[in-house]
Image (cartoon, grey):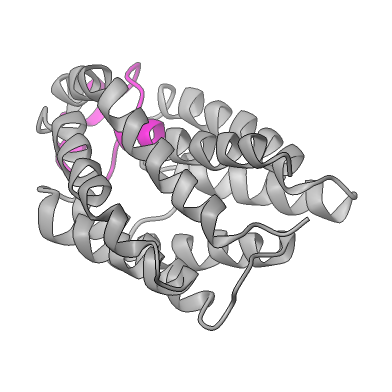
Amino acid sequence: MAATKKDVLNFVQIFDQKMEEHRQELTDMDQAIGDGDHGINMNRGMKAVGEKLPTFQDKTIDAILKGVGMTLVSTVGGASGPLYGTAFMRAGMAMKGEEELSAEDIGKMFDAAIEGIVSRGKATTGEKTMLDAIVPAKDAYNESIASGKTITEALTVAEKAAWKGVDYTKTIKATKGRASYLGDRSIGFQDPGATSITYMIQSAKEAGEKAGK
């Protein structure tokens, strides 16, 4: 069963709520190894997106995703705004003209979002970034769809893979961003960006559950 525009709007709304709910947790994580503002910034950005949601109701899926991305770029400070903003905008561009999203379309959105993060952040996996959560999530999602699982079942598996990626970030040192200044002292701390992007995948799963897909 395909995902509709309503499902996409639900996903965005759930992610907004999660950034509000986990604002302090993400900020505390970032205070340990970064600028100390990841939760505050993501909460501010998604709140701005939430306020714009009524204006997205009549837009196409690709326009909604691009609108989310542009809002995040303009309202989120630090590296997170450009990274998340680019991810959403690239995902939107990949879905141009689509009125609903098949399981394969969502896989393409994962790919486009990751390409955007890689090109903007000049990072790869193993550097203690959001890529350490979203890349294994994408692989797990694609494998699940190929084995016949539904969108929501595949997103459930993807979320589990993303949390494993978050745990992995505790075992490695940061080589990108402010955390890289700590070198080996960054080992033992989980990456806040990997954590917030896992909440994003969780939001997509919950939107699927809500829709019964």
Comparing 38 with 204, the one in front is 204
- Which residues make up the magenta segment? 173-196
Q: Is residue 148 left or right of residue 129?
A: right
As drawn, the residue found furthest toward the right would be: 148
Q: What residue do we see at 21% from left, 48% from top?
A: 51
Query: How many numbered circles does the render carry?
Result: 0
Q: Quadrant of residue 196 in the image?
A: top left
Q: Is residue 182 left or right of residue 69?
A: left
Q: Quadrant of residue 37 in the image?
A: top left
Q: Quadrant of residue 98 in the image?
A: bottom right
Comparing 80 with 211, the one in front is 211
Query: Residue 131's x, y, as percent?
Result: 44, 47
Visible residue check, residue 127: yes
As drawn, the residue found furthest toward the bottom would be: 97
In the image, is residue 18 above or below residue 4? above
Query: Residue 106's x, y, as percent?
Result: 62, 60
Quadrant where the N terminus is found in the figure: bottom right
Q: What residue do we see at 74% from left, 44% from top?
A: 213
Query: Residue 185's x, y, as percent?
Result: 23, 21
Residue 15 magenta-highlighted = no
In the image, is residue 68 above or below residue 78? below
Query: Residue 168's x, y, as percent?
Result: 50, 27
Q: Is residue 60 left or right of residue 103?
A: left
Q: What residue do we see at 89% from left, 49% from top?
A: 147
Residue 183 magenta-highlighted = yes
Q: What residue do we see at 61% from left, 60% from top?
A: 4
Comparing 143 with 61, the one in front is 61
Visible residue check, residue 131: no
